[in-house]
Image (cartoon, rainbow, N blue to C red):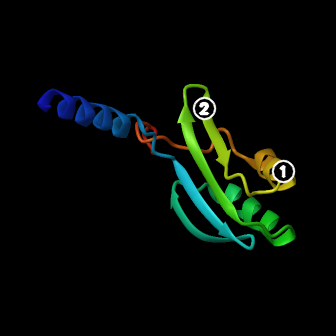
């Protein structure tokens, strides 16, 4: 019984450790940013606000750091046209991960 409990605790601990934290997490309601957490590049924020004014939408956007660079993930309720517009203005070089130095030189 104790071994089963320890295995369950170990599996849960590994699952929690494996969860990735996004570099950026933004929530929208009616095309307006209602909450954001993380590094939000100014030009990207301006473009997303502009897209939200033109085509109001609800949902969430998360940006994760991958080996190949930042990757953007959308919630399923965001319309495909809005996803495409946001992807077009997404700054692949504008995100800073936790391990990178913000001021180089």
* The C terminus lies in quadrant: top left
Query: What percent of the width, then of the height, locates residue 53?
Result: 81, 72
10 Å crowding of disc 1: few (<14), some (14-19), many (20+): few
Secondary structure state at the residue bearing disc 2: strand
Along the polypeptide, which appears first: circle 1 or circle 2?
A: 2
Query: What percent of the width, then of the height, locates residue 6?
Result: 18, 31
How many numbered marks, from 0 up?
2
Q: Is residue 50 left or right of residue 70?
A: right
Return the residue at label 1.
80
Secondary structure state at the residue bearing disc 1: helix
The residue sitting at 21% across, 30% down in the picture is 4
Query: What percent of the width, then of the height, locates residue 54?
Result: 86, 69
The residue sitting at 54% across, 36% down in the picture is 65
> CA separation, marks 1 and 2?
23 Å
Return the residue at label 2.
69
Between tags 1 and 2, which lies in front?
Answer: 1
The residue sitting at 74% across, 73% down in the picture is 30
Q: Nearer the viewer, residue 53 or 39?
A: 53
The numbered dot on residue 97 is: none
Q: Are marks 1 and 2 in contact (CB under 8 Å)?
A: no
The residue sitting at 45% across, 45% down in the picture is 21
10 Å crowding of disc 2: few (<14), some (14-19), many (20+): few
For residue 31, above or below residue 92: below
């Amino acid at each position: 019984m104790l071994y089963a409990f320890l295995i369950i605790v170990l599996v849960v601990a590994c699952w929690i450790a494996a969860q990735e934290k996004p570099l950026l997490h933004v929530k929208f309601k009616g095309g307006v940013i209602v909450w954001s957490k993380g590094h939000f590049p100014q030009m990207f924020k301006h473009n997303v606000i502009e897209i939200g004014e033109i085509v109001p939408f609800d949902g969430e956007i998360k940006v994760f750091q991958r080996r190949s660079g930042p990757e953007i993930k959308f919630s399923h309720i965001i319309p495909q046209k809005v996803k495409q517009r946001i992807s077009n203005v997404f700054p692949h070089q504008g995100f800073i991960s936790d391990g990178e130095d913000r001021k180089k030189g």
